[in-house]
């Protein structure tokens, strides 16, 4: 009887443990699903992020409001349009290559930097992460993408690069081209101090004027390198 009771308790513990494990698993699944729905709703209404899905036919099967608002040139919706309609021609191949890689590495997020039409004859630079959409049977359905505008970052990066180049040039000019006329001026002023006769002073004065003009020209070149490059702010609707 005692052995039977112990066995019954052991079985009951196993059953209860399994029950609690399944309950916790279901609870976690529910929480994840609930958060997924909230995240989906957040991305759908976001005015910063773009969310899209592209089907196996290379056409948009989902576009968020923000993406449609910024890149739709049809006046209706990008839904059903070919994905290339918004892209810079040179970036279509990038998108295709990353899309193919998504299917080779399902579950992995892959990055891509793409230029998109801004609706004003120009382009904005966007950064994306892409992942394959896989159905319950493990078959590919399309590509899901999340992106955002990085145009201001790219412009600022280019400006910093230009400024760095200018500073390098300024350093070279100061260390090489400024020294020559400055050394001449210092030497000529010493000659003036020790000069005898009006004729010598006139010759030295001409040389001093020439060296001063050379130094002034170099200073003008340095000033030109330090001018701030004007920028146009990037505006989104």
Image: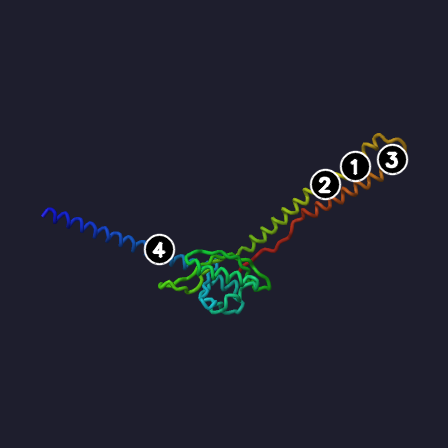
Q: Residue 129: image x %, image y %?
A: 47, 57
Query: Which of marks 4 and 2 precedes in the sequence?
Result: 4
Q: Is residue 59 left or right of residue 162?
A: left
Query: Which of marks 1 and 2 precedes in the sequence?
Result: 2
Q: Residue 166: image x %, image y %?
A: 66, 47
**Is the residue marked by circle 2 packed among few (<14), some (14-19), or many (20+) residues within 10 Å?**
few
Q: CA distance from mark 4 to mark 1?
A: 77 Å
Q: Nearer the viewer, residue 10 or 208?
A: 10
Q: Which residue is mark 2?
A: 176
Query: Which of marks 1 and 4 precedes in the sequence?
Result: 4
Q: Is residue 19 left or right of residue 132?
A: left
Q: Are marks 1 and 3 in contact (CB under 8 Å)?
A: no
Q: Residue at (43%, 56%) from the top-left corner?
A: 108
Location of residue 66 with respect to 212 vertically, above or below? below
Q: Which residue is mark 1?
A: 185
Q: Which residue is mark 3?
A: 201
Q: Kindly indicate the quadrant of the structure image that contains residue 73.
A: bottom right
Q: CA distance from mark 3 to mark 2?
A: 28 Å
Circle 4: element type: helix
Circle 2: element type: helix
Q: Residue at (90%, 35%) from the top-left corner?
A: 199
Q: Which residue is mark 4?
A: 32
């Amino acid at each position: 009887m005692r052995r039977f009771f112990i066995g019954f308790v052991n079985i009951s513990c196993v059953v209860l443990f399994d029950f609690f494990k399944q309950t916790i698993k279901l609870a976690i699944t529910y929480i994840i699903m609930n958060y997924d729905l909230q995240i989906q709703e957040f991305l759908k209404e976001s005015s910063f992020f773009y969310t899209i899905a592209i089907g196996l036919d290379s056409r948009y099967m989902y576009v968020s409001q923000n993406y449609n608002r910024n890149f739709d040139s049809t006046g209706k919706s990008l839904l059903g349009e070919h994905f290339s309609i918004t892209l810079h021609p040179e970036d279509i191949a990038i998108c295709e290559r990353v899309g193919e890689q998504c299917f080779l590495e399902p579950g992995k997020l892959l990055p891509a930097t793409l230029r998109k039409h801004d609706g004003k004859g120009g382009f904005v630079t966007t950064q994306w992460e892409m992942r394959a959409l896989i159905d319950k049977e493990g078959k590919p359905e399309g590509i899901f993408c999340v992106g955002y505008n990085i145009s201001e970052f790219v412009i600022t990066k280019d400006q910093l690069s230009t400024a760095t180049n200018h500073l390098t040039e300024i350093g070279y000019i100061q260390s090489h081209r400024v020294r020559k006329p400055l050394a001449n001026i210092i030497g000529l002023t010493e000659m003036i101090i020790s000069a005898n006769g009006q004729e010598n002073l006139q010759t030295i004065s001409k040389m001093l004027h020439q060296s001063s003009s050379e130094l002034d020209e170099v200073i003008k070149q340095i000033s030109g390198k330090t001018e701030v490059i004007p920028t146009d702010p990037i505006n989104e609707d």
